[in-house]
Image (cartoon, rainbow, N blue to C red):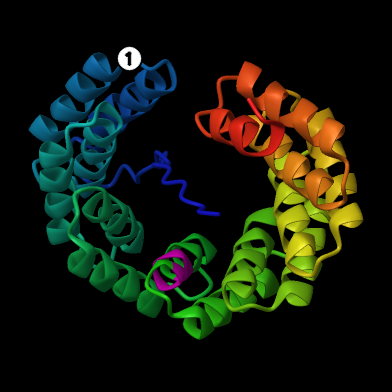
Amino acid sequence: MRYFIILFVSALFLFGACKPGASETDAHLAKGNDYVLLDDFANAKKEYDLALKVDTANWRACYELGGVYELEGDFTNALYYFNRAIKLNPKFTLGYYNRANLEELMGDEKASVADLRFTLEHKKGFYMALIAESRKNINAGKYKEALADLDEVIQLRQDFYLPYSMRGSCKFKMGDMAGAVQDFGMEIRTQPGHAMGYVNRAVAYSGMKEYRAAIIDLDTAIQIDPRWSQAYLYRGQFLYTLKSKDSACHDFRTAQALNDPQADGYVKQYCGK
């Protein structure tokens, strides 16, 4: 159960008019932001470039350009402009956070970790940076460190499902099935329409050999997302464990019809074909 979602959030800035050319710069930045919202990245970059021509030291324009290049998948230029924004404004913590995400995408984990640490040292309570750090710790097997980060996130955002989901996954990896069930329950409570929460809790229930409870959760997950083949595979396994071979094979074949790459193996192993 891996949660890895990386988002670039375009910052919409308003500047003071005390600096020469500030109003013109603001206008280009505002137009650039409008183009980003329309997915017109070419014109967005033109407006941000014009803002830089008016004011070559405008770190906001550099930051926005970095974000657009990242959205386009041009990581080299994205990194260049994030670096330039941070050089112009070394205290801009959001720049370090977005650069950390980009560095991770580029495979520079050491630099990514360093930027996240800088972000958290200089911006207390930045819960998205805490989530990113906890994910890194989970991937590295540093579960206690991950739990500490996620506990802090939950104190800051008790209504957000993701830290409960990640904490549940962390506890699952640590063998704490009861704790995982509890956290996945909180994930469901905060995001009841999120099918993954029910699947997560079902798997944790299976670790406690509570297969009927697991099947009930999978029933709900399938009601939410009837085309999620993995839910059928899990339910099929648990039904088979409870000696309901016909129902299990029906689920395996449903997953097969949904083109799940593992389904053929399950059908051959459990259904004799």
The residue identified by callout 1 is 40
Q: Quadrant of the N terminus?
A: bottom right
Q: Is residue 136 magenta?
A: yes
Residue drawn at the location 8% of the way across and 41% of the way down: 56
Residue drawn at the location 36% of the way across and 18% of the way down: 35
- Look at the picture and state if 143 lies above or below 93: below
What secondary structure is marked by label 1?
Answer: loop
Q: Nearer the viewer, residue 16 or 40?
A: 40
**187 to the left or right of 58:** right
**Residue 36: % across, % down:** 37, 23
Majority secondary structure of magenta residues: helix
Q: Is residue 95 visible?
A: yes
**Residue 209: % across, % down:** 81, 66
**Residue 182: % across, % down:** 80, 69
Task: Identify which amino acid the numbered label 1 is placed on.
Answer: Asp
- Look at the picture and state if 75 lies above or below 120: above
Q: Nearer the viewer, residue 3 or 94?
A: 3
Residue drawn at the location 39% of the way across and 41% of the way down: 8
**66 to the left or right of 39:** left
Q: Quadrant of the C terminus?
A: top right
Q: Is residue 216 magenta?
A: no
What is the magenta range?
Answer: 134-138
Residue 140 falls in image quadrant = bottom left
Q: Nearer the viewer, residue 229 or 23?
A: 229
Residue 234 falls in image quadrant = top right
Q: Nearer the viewer, residue 269 or 197?
A: 269
Q: Is residue 194 visible?
A: no
